[in-house]
């Protein structure tokens, strides 16, 4: 249903035009000299790959080129692409949208990261696959979040379980899972709070929500929504959520809105978390399962 390559292409267009086309052109030379590597590092850092990840990538590529005795620019460019793919391949449990088991997906992330829209995209794609989906509005601290989720539920045609603003998020999760059992839902997607008064309160709230969900004999995943346009700042946020909630993988939203798509490499290298989905535009079907080879091809094409 989703044209994966065209969606990925759409998502990386700005990054390709701004930085990765320049990186590709570096290797139009007949041979690769020391200054080529220096220029490469500068371009990678400018594309938000981050210093540590850029150094790691260059080290790996130089080693590969040395061992394979690659001297021509085009050969070294191919080696760089191979090492990018290797860096992006983080062990994960596969695309859990395609698993046949019943499951609950807790969606976490800071407010403004595109969390609710990303949930709508997941629900839309799952519904198109013939799955029965129920949404739980457990971000009870923001009335707007509850209304937004209800709006998307209506738009897509899926049930939404919600309480009054300010209610207990754990109670929402409990009621959502009860409803899922009664209505034989395949997938439950829970929206969670993105901000409380302190980081400690937020993380404790998320742990509580996880505990309530884990009382049900149903596979549980935690999906972190990260806004690609926040770049390196997003990494710090992601670390907090990962420490508190044991994140299964990342939905990288708004990738089409940044020219610095190199953040994808930094996420995989520094957080050791798989990117599972990318957001590629405004429409409900503007998302794609993340594919390392497809991503690298798109960003260099």
Image: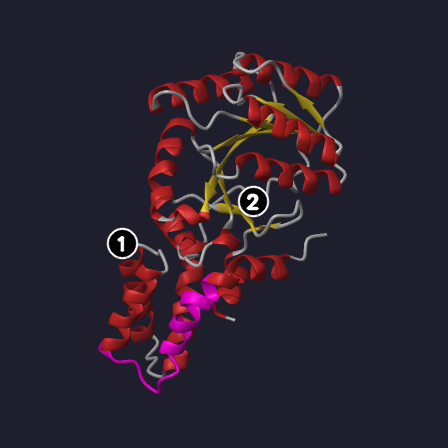
Q: Position of residue 151 (x, y in %)?
A: 68, 30
Residue 58, above or below 217: below
For mark 1, does the 10 Å Cα neighbourhood hold few (<14), some (14 to 19), or many (20 or more) residues?
Answer: few
- Mark 2 and mark 1 in contact? Answer it, CB < 8 Å: no
Q: Is residue 219 magenta?
A: no
Q: How is the image coloured?
A: secondary structure
Residue 52's disc is 1
Residue beneath disc 2: 94
Q: Would residue 24 be counted in the magenta stretch?
A: yes
Crowd around label 2: few <14 · some 14–19 · many ≥20 (10 Å): few
Taking the image as shown, residue 127 lies to the left or right of residue 239, namely: right
Is 43 left or right of 35, judged from the image as shown? right
- What whole-number distance in Å separates the C-alpha atoms at marks 2 and 1? 27 Å
Towards the viewer: 217 or 104: 104
The range drawn in magenta is: 15-34
Choose top left, top right, bottom left or bottom right for residue 32. Answer: bottom left
């Amino acid at each position: 249903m989703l044209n994966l390559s065209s969606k990925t292409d759409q998502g990386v267009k700005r990054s390709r035009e701004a930085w990765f086309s320049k990186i590709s052109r570096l290797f139009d030379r007949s041979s690769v000299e020391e200054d080529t590597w220096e220029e490469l590092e500068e371009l990678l850092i400018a594309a938000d790959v981050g210093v540590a990840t850029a150094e790691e990538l260059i080290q790996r590529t130089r080693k590969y080129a040395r061992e394979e005795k690659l001297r021509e620019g085009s050969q070294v460019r191919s080696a760089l692409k191979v090492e990018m793919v290797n860096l992006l391949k983080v062990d994960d449990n596969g695309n859990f949208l395609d698993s046949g088991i019943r499951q609950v997906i807790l969606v976490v992330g800071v407010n403004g990261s595109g969390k609710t829209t990303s949930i709508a995209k997941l629900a839309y794609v799952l519904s198109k696959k013939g799955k029965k989906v129920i949404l739980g509005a457990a971000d009870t601290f923001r009335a707007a979040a509850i209304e937004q989720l209800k709006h998307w539920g209506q738009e897509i045609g899926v049930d939404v379980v919600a309480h009054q603003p300010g209610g207990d998020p754990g109670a929402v999760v409990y009621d959502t899972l009860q409803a899922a059992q009664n209505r034989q839902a395949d997938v439950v997607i829970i929206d969670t709070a993105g901000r409380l008064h302190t980081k400690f309160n937020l993380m404790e709230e998320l742990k509580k929500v996880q505990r309530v969900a884990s009382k049900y004999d149903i596979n549980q995943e935690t999906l972190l929504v990260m806004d690609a346009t926040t770049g390196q700042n997003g990494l710090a946020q992601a670390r907090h959520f990962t420490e508190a909630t044991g994140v299964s993988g990342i939905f990288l939203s708004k990738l089409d809105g940044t020219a610095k798509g190199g953040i994808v490499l930094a996420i995989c290298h520094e957080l050791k978390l798989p990117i599972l989905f990318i957001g590629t535009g405004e429409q409900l079907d503007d998302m794609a399962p993340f594919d390392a080879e497809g991503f690298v091809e798109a960003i260099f094409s």
